[in-house]
Amino acid sequence: MVKAFETLDESKKKRIIDAAIHEFAEHLYEQASTNRIVKEARIGKGMLFHYFETKQALYEYLVDRALNVMEELYVQYIDVSEPDFIERMKGSAKLKMDVYRLHPDLFHFIGQVVLEKESRIPKALGERLEKMQQDGLTSLFSGIDLSKFRDDIPADDVMKLISWSIEGYGKELLAKLDGQTFVELEVDSYWHEFYAFLDVLKRIYYK
Amino acid sequence: MVKAFETLDESKKKRIIDAAIHEFAEHLYEQASTNRIVKEARIGKGMLFHYFETKQALYEYLVDRALNVMEELYVQYIDVSEPDFIERMKGSAKLKMDVYRLHPDLFHFIGQVVLEKESRIPKALGERLEKMQQDGLTSLFSGIDLSKFRDDIPADDVMKLISWSIEGYGKELLAKLDGQTFVELEVDSYWHEFYAFLDVLKRIYYK
DNA sequence: CATACTTCGACCAGTGTGGTCAATGAATAA
DNA sequence: TTATTCATTGACCACACTGGTCGAAGTATG
């Protein structure tokens, strides 16, 4: 029963969740191994199946948790009232990069869940996930003040071009940061470079 | 011995190669199953190990073959004498998309080979692969006439922005095309749209 | 008929799977 | 103290699948 798991002391709980997320982040459901999870979490095999009835139940618990975390972070970063497209993208990009840097396993885990062809998750969770993706899109592209864009290129194209450019920039940055650890100050300097990059994009694509 | 395999009638040979490439395209080396390969190729298990001594030998044969195909296509599409950046990118994009559409398994297979952390392939093959990647980069970015670019943005940044934009466009196009089959005429219309898109990029990033 | 080559798939030992359960330890209640 | 309850372990289970082997059957050629 999950009850027993919830009343566990925080550190052991975290160890188990981290180990499980890590395993499911690196393998699809079928390939993920409960043996490796208990080993990494440093608990006996029996305990895992005491807390969660089956591998599937564990998986659903993790998906639920991941969705909660993401939904929480989401409102913190995305400002749908901001009419400037690039400014709104700024929040979205920060969200993505922060999640990636702070919780890389969670990031990959959600990726795997989405990727899983035969959806493993019950309808309710699937709908929440889909809603999250849908909201992500609409909250990025709707209610934008299009009049700021240069008008020799259709607004839709401008938004796509800007998105792709930011995506490319983010990927390059992530590759550069890969494996490094950062003090706050250094991270700040990367954000400054990013803001400068966004200004370049404004110069290119705004009137 | 590979000799016996090479003297096989073409259709059976193709069936085996296709099945094997397909399997290694969808799984990493360890996860790829010789059982599934022989099943898909409709041959007995014994035959596979008659033609190739081990799974590893089969794998290396496939990598070699894939490299040959890629090297051949490569010279056909990339014109290093073209000084116009976007024109050169055009060839590269066509190469990528054609390979993806015509030989999607081969495309993914090479991806898996590159991805494989502990390199499975002998040094000689590894060097060929690395050379291919290296050449791919240098032949895209060196010898470009930078004077065409607008000069309020560093040339390096312009090239990156253009690359990212084309990449994004390609990904969107591929998603749109996913699963569809095309007669030549329809494909042409997509290329025309692509050329128009490249003209937009020229308008944006060239003087 | 004999010889050689092709083809098959049952079989091998090994590894790993999700899940169980008898046994022990530890804590609490009487 | 003893009795009871719950936490915890890891050996163990049946099963699935692995890369690779090999004896036998089939086929072609001499």
Image (cartoon, coloured by chain):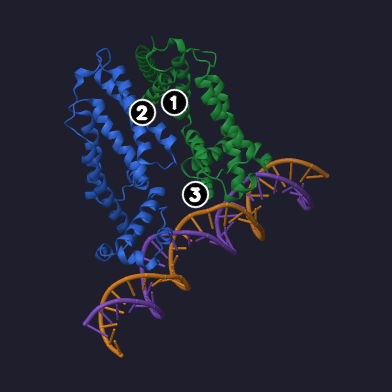
Chain colours: A green, B blue, C orange, D purple
* Residue topped by disc 2: B193
* Residue topped by disc 1: A97
Chain label for disc 3: A
Distance in Å between CA atoms under marks 2 and 1 = 33 Å
Left or right of A56? Residue B32 is left
Task: Report the front residue among B66 and B89.
Answer: B89
Q: How many marks?
A: 3
Q: Amino acid at mark 1?
A: Met
- What residue appears at the point 50 percent right and 34 percent down from the top-left corner? A106
- What residue appears at the point 33 percent right and 21 percent down from the top-left corner? B200
The x, y position of residue B53, in whole percent, is 30, 64
Q: Can the viewer see residue A15 in this picture?
A: yes
Q: Are marks 2 and 1 on the same chain?
A: no
Image quadrant assignment for residue A159: top left
Q: Quadrant of the C terminus of chain B?
A: top left
* Residue topped by disc 3: A31
Among the two numbered marks 1 and 3 on one chain, the one whose residue lies closer to the N terminus: 3
